[in-house]
Image: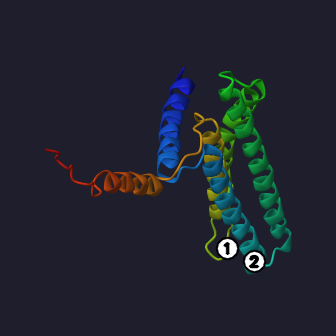
Amino acid sequence: MIYEKIDEFIMYGVNKAVHAWNWITGGTKADLANILSTIGAVTGSTGFVLDGMVDGRPYSMAGFPLLILISHVLQQVNSKVETLESRALEKEAKDFEVEKDKIQYEKAGYALPCMAAGFQFMGDASEDSYSPLPLVNIALLLTGASCHVMRADYLPPRKNALSRAKDSLVDVVKSYSKKPAPVESR
C-alpha cells in the first residue's frame, strides 16, 4: 500500500519531467533516459579512474569499461522499448514485451538508488584517501532515474519549443503581410 503510493508519487513527477522534456526539446523519453544513463556512466567511470590513478589501485579501473558497457546495453534496450511502444500505440494496443520491460525498469529504478545508499554507508570514511563512492553513487542514482524515465508515458518526438515559436511567429508575420488594397469599381 505504501509502496504503491510512493511509486505513484515518483512516477507522477517523472511523467511531468518527461512531458516538460518533450515540450521543450521535442525529444522522447528514451532520449532523456539515454542522456541520464550516459552522464551516469561518465560520472561513475571518472570515479573509478580517479581511484585507480590517485590511490594507485589499478583494479579499480575495471569499473570504467563495465559502466560504459552497462550504459551502452541499457541505451540499446531503451531504443528497442521505445520502438516497440511506438508501434503498439500506432495500433492502439500495448506491447507485452514493453510491459515486461517496464517491470524490470521499476525493479532497477529502485534497486540502484538503494545500492548507492548502501555503498555510501559502507564506504571508507578516512580523509587521507580518495574514495570513488560519491561519483559511483551519483552514477547509480542517474541510472536509476533513467529506468524510471523509461516507465513514463510514451510521447512521440516533435519540434522543440524554439522551432515551434519561430513557426508561429512566421505565421503571424505572414498573416499581417501587405495585402493589396481592394479596388472599387464604379
Q: In terms of depth relative to the viewer, which is nearer, 177 or 68?
A: 177
Where residue 137 sits in the image (x, y, percent)?
64, 56
- Tell me where residue 71 appears, x and y as whole percent: 75, 54
Pick out the residue farthest to the front.
186
Q: Amino acid at mark 1?
A: Tyr
Where 39 falls versus 153 (above or below)? below
Dot 2: element: loop
Compared to residue 67, the image places residue 143 above or below, namely above
Which is nearer the eye, 97 or 176? Answer: 176
State which tag comes first along the sequence, 2 or 1.
Answer: 2
Residue receiving disc 1: 130
Name the residue that disc number 2 marks: 55
Point out residue 62 in the picture as x, y percentages from the top left corner: 85, 65
Q: Are marks 2 and 1 in contact (CB under 8 Å)?
A: yes
Q: How is the image coloured?
A: rainbow
- Count residues near mark 1 (Cα–Cα under 10 Å), then give few for <14, some for 14-19, many for 20+: some
Residue sitting at the far left: 186
